[in-house]
Image (cartoon, helix red, strand yellow):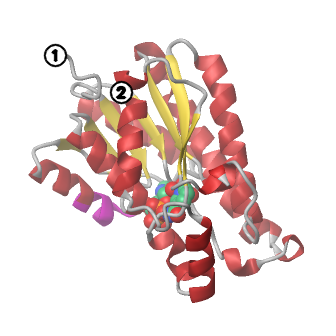
Amino acid sequence: MHDEFDLSGRVAVVTGGSRGIGRAIAEGLAGAGAAVVPAARTRGDVETVAETIREAGGEARAATVDVTDEDSVEALFEEAVDAFGGVDVVVNNAGVNPDPALGRPERVDLDDGFDSTVDVNLRGAFACAQASAEYLVDGGGSLINVASVGGLVGLPRQHPYVASKHGLVGLTKSMALDWAPEVRVNAIAPGYVATDLIEEAMENEDIRQSLLDRTPLERFADPDEIAGPAVFLASDAASYVTGSVLSVDGGWTSR
Ligand SMILES: NC(=O)c1ccc[n+]([C@@H]2O[C@H](COP(=O)([O-])OP(=O)(O)OC[C@H]3O[C@@H](n4cnc5c(N)ncnc54)[C@H](O)[C@@H]3O)[C@@H](O)[C@H]2O)c1
């Protein structure tokens, strides 16, 4: 029987693939049969991920990328094509959320706080989409943007992050229109996931408890719990899914 989740023969590029959610997605896609290119700024970290995938019997090539640098983004997709002959799946996962403790909107630094966040989370994702377009549109494919519950609802004290993730959800929908029917474009909107990104906020017991109280499933997600939804959106199981935002948030946005 044809397994519609099988990604054998597909090539997937995962930005921010060195740790956290990106690492889990890279390993999940590889587990479903894809050849994977995990990419982030530091080679050592992505090498470790690629090696873990190869040791498990999968195919992987580590690559470096800074998504805020267009030349580096171009080079990433060229490297993926050199390594595996094409690109079928792109996961725009690289993201930052610097110092959410900055607080009220009037205290956010426009250069360091706002621009730097939007540069990675929104502009960087769009740059990767643009650079991969020629490969995806030619061969069909799936573009997956890792947004956030902060792309669907407001979050206090996280204005640049929320703006960037709402922007990413908007881009998801409008790219889905322009690239249909060749490329499906979707977003995943995770709730709180136990990674380095939220480690600092979680050290504050009051914040931690209030986030848990707000989450119907009463716990934070494990990064691996974001991998299954990415495999689904990358695969033929999602062949009629485009322009959608899949909440993976333990019920956060149902309140
Ligand atoms: N952790 C959460 O609770 C949570 C919730 C919702 C959405 N997300 C989103 O999931 C994605 C992954 O987050 P995470 O929690 O795994 O964070 P993380 O900090 O553990 O990992 C972020 C990854 O992005 C990479 N990165 C950052 N800037 C980059 C750049 N300029 N170029 C290339 N790579 C860059 C880092 O090297 C790292 O690999 C982000 O887009 C984040 O906004 C996270």
Q: Nearer the viewer, residue 39 or 90?
A: 90
Q: Nearer the viewer, residue 150 or 248?
A: 248
Residue holding disc 2? 235
Is residue 161 rendered magenta in the image?
no
Which residue is painted at 43% across and 24% down in the image? 238
Residue 61 located left or right of residue 177 = left
Q: The residue under label 2 is which amino acid type?
A: Ser
Mark 1 and mark 2: span between their CA atoms?
16 Å
Per the picture, the main secondary structure of the magenta-coloured stretch is: helix
Q: Is residue 181 above or below residue 77?
A: above
Q: Is residue 161 above or below residue 7?
A: below
Residue holding disc 1? 1
Q: Is residue 41 visible?
A: no
Number of the front mark, 1 or 2? 1
Q: The residue under label 1 is which amino acid type?
A: Met
Placement of the N terminus among the 4 image quadrants? top left
Q: Which residues are magenta?
A: 42-48
Q: Is residue 183 above or below residue 104?
A: above
Which residue is painted at 15% across and 42% down in the image? 58
Question: Which percent across, then down, holds residue 244?
Answer: 59, 31
Q: Is residue 53 visible?
A: yes
For the image, the number of numbered tags is 2
Question: Which percent across, then down, holds residue 156?
Answer: 76, 69
